[in-house]
Amino acid sequence: MKRVIWLAAISVVVVPVSQAQTQSATPADTSRTLPEVQVTYQAERRTPVTFLDLSGRALARKSVGQEPSFLLAETPAITAYSDAGSTQGYAYFRMRGIDQTRINTTLNGVPLNEPEDQGAYFSNYPDLLNSISKVQVQRGVGTSQNGSASFGGSIQLFSPSLRQDSASATVGLGYGSFNSYRAFGEYASGLHGRKALYVRASQLHSDGYKDRSANTSRSVFISGGLFYDKTTWKLNVLAGHQQNQLAWLGVPDSVLAVNRRANVNGPENDRFDQALVQLQNTWQPAAGTVVNTSVYASFLKGNYDFDLNSFLGLPSTAELYNYAFQSGFWGAYTSYSRQLGRLTWTSGLHANTYHRQHTGSEKALGQLYQNTGRKREASAFTKLEYEVQRFTLFADVQGRTVAFEYDGAVPLGKLDWQFFNPKAGVSFAASNHATLYYSLGRTGREPTRNDLFGGSDDLLADADGQALITSPAAEYVLDQELGLRYQRSQLEIGVNGYYMDFKNEIVLNGKFGPNGLALTNNVKSSVRTGLEATARWQASRHWSLLNNSAFNYSRIREQTEEFRPILTPGLILNQEVAYQTGPWAATVAGRYQSRSFVDFANSATIGEYALLNARLEYSSRHYQVTAFANNLTNTKYFNNGSVEADGTRKYFVQAPRNYYLSVQYRF
């Protein structure tokens, strides 16, 4: 299966592009009429939503194959942690305390969230940020997106730019603490006539900080483009393979007091392959009119072991369960954009269908069950932006319908949900450099399969034989954002406040179900509010400063009780100071994260902590050598945890002081 995915990924894109190169070439300037394929869901300078653009080149300088969650955590209001304690393998992020199953994630508009559990697994596409031209992070409801609801925000990734002036190739090697290494090769053909090609392949490994928590993975990203006067075609193929020694269980504090690298998981492993293929087209039938269309398909196959005794805190035996998955995901979207003077109108359609087969087995007993979940989704949106002198009026309305069906031993009727998601706002250009904005948006989100099944992979029945379903009710949020953006060549500032009012919010309760997945509760009413800021100052030719900060005040109200949501720190500060002279660059970055709770009772906490990281880089025409030193103060800290019914507190340890050296050669 692994070889099939890799060979298919290479053949799908290389054959069409190589054939296209035999066609007659035209002058390069005629193929530059259109920009590369653009996704019309991103926010622009005057769009009244809270967003932050991240340069792919800047991210690549920091990336050594670590999970994107850790680089995203350098932006306001995002926290991250990993199972293994290092930066490779399974890692997770939260935005404003909201977990990533409620964060919309896309690549060129293609949903990366798995429709059943709505999680986006970057680990299945290792070294992904090495091939990304740009990331837009929207916090809050934001603009309409394809796929799962932008409930807490969205992460939009954009594929590599193909229009380079000349061909280039890069090879890179890196090695660091915990026997972590990365090797990659990258080639960009540049634009030749109407054709361009990009290829990147990576191999990564880390033993992990925790005992027996290794990750071995590889990936390939191939992108080919054809550029004509009024139309652009782009084909993207992304494939990844990963193997992990599992370390997803929290470790009791009594065990950590003796051995901080302890892993209480048993002899459990996982293996996953995933591939994504996307064909994009941009067509400009007339001046001021652009039509974007895309079709895509994604395939996943893999399994993970589950040691029930380890989960229960008992010694491991020969008993070992396994959960296997195989899924297919097909979809298409199109959008039409028309600019008439000061009015820009964009409308779009999106539809997809998904199925995933679940198989549970035990080492000695063999197959125990098999079931299939099917999910279909369709959505439509229309968006208007109208400029009136210094004001930009914004309206965005989306309709979305979702249906879930289940085929297993316990009968379950079709479940469906319909959502009407309106958004509106206004921005005011106070000057050529400053923009004030306010937005109001509402969106709804259906529960995940895990929410519905109470953490069971195979649907259970009650005493009457009826499907044992927890609340199928959707959750809703009304989000208000008020902010200021100021931008000059040497100074950029963004400040915003938000007020998110939730109804029937689905929140993590700090417990885990029988298949090891985190459990949730519905809460009648909850509020998340806060202030966020980002600033970049080029103080001189050599010195620059970057700050990303977030203050959060959140409360859950349930009957007469009021408490704070779990894993939601009140204060996060990221500060970076950089110095550059000639080919040398040095950066020191600090992070402070205040305490947060790990249980509904607000009795157990993750303590506050501060980290200090440094980076030293030497760049020449062909070489780039970078040394990384992380957690210089050797801080002993946790950033996730849980509390058992008997009061046992379990935590996830993150790595102490560690180092990494990266060398790249470009030719």
Image (cartoon, rainbow, N blue to C red):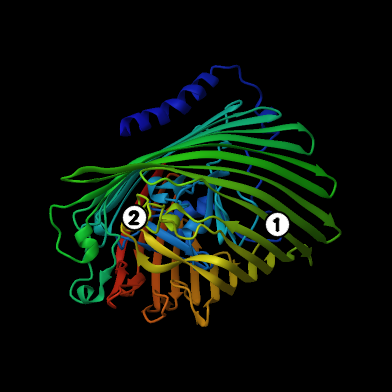
Q: Quadrant of residue 288?
A: top right
Numbered mark located on residue 320 in the image:
none
- Amino acid at circle 1: Pro
Compared to 356, does 536 lie above or below? below
* Residue drawn at 55 percent across, 71 percent down: 524
Q: Residue furthest front?
A: 464
459 or 446: nearer the eye? 459
The foreground one among 100 and 358 is: 358
Q: Does the residue at mark 2 contact the one at mark 1 (Cβ under 8 Å)?
A: no
Q: Is residue 484 above or below residue 57?
A: below
Residue 640: image location, x then y, percent: 37, 69
Relative depth, front residue between 483 and 444? 444
Q: Which residue is mark 2?
A: 88
- According to the picture, the residue beneath numbered tag 1 turns out to be 422
List x then y, in percent, for residue 565.
Answer: 48, 73
Tag 2 secondary structure: loop
Residue displayed at 54% across by 72% down? 549
Q: Quadrant of the N terminus?
A: top left
Q: Would you place residue 52 above or below residue 529 in this image? A: above
Q: Residue at x 22, y 56 (%)?
A: 307
What is the crowding at mark 2: few (fewer than 14 residues within 10 Å), some, or many (at least 20)?
A: many
Camera-near label (2 vs 1) is 1
Could you tell me which quadrant the C terminus lies in?
A: top left
Q: Indicate the secondary structure of the residue bearing disc 1.
A: strand
In the depicted view, which residue is nearer to us: 397 or 481? 397
Report the residue at 24% width, 55% height from top: 207
- Amino acid tagged 2: Gln
Relative height, residue 347 to residue 252 (above, below): above
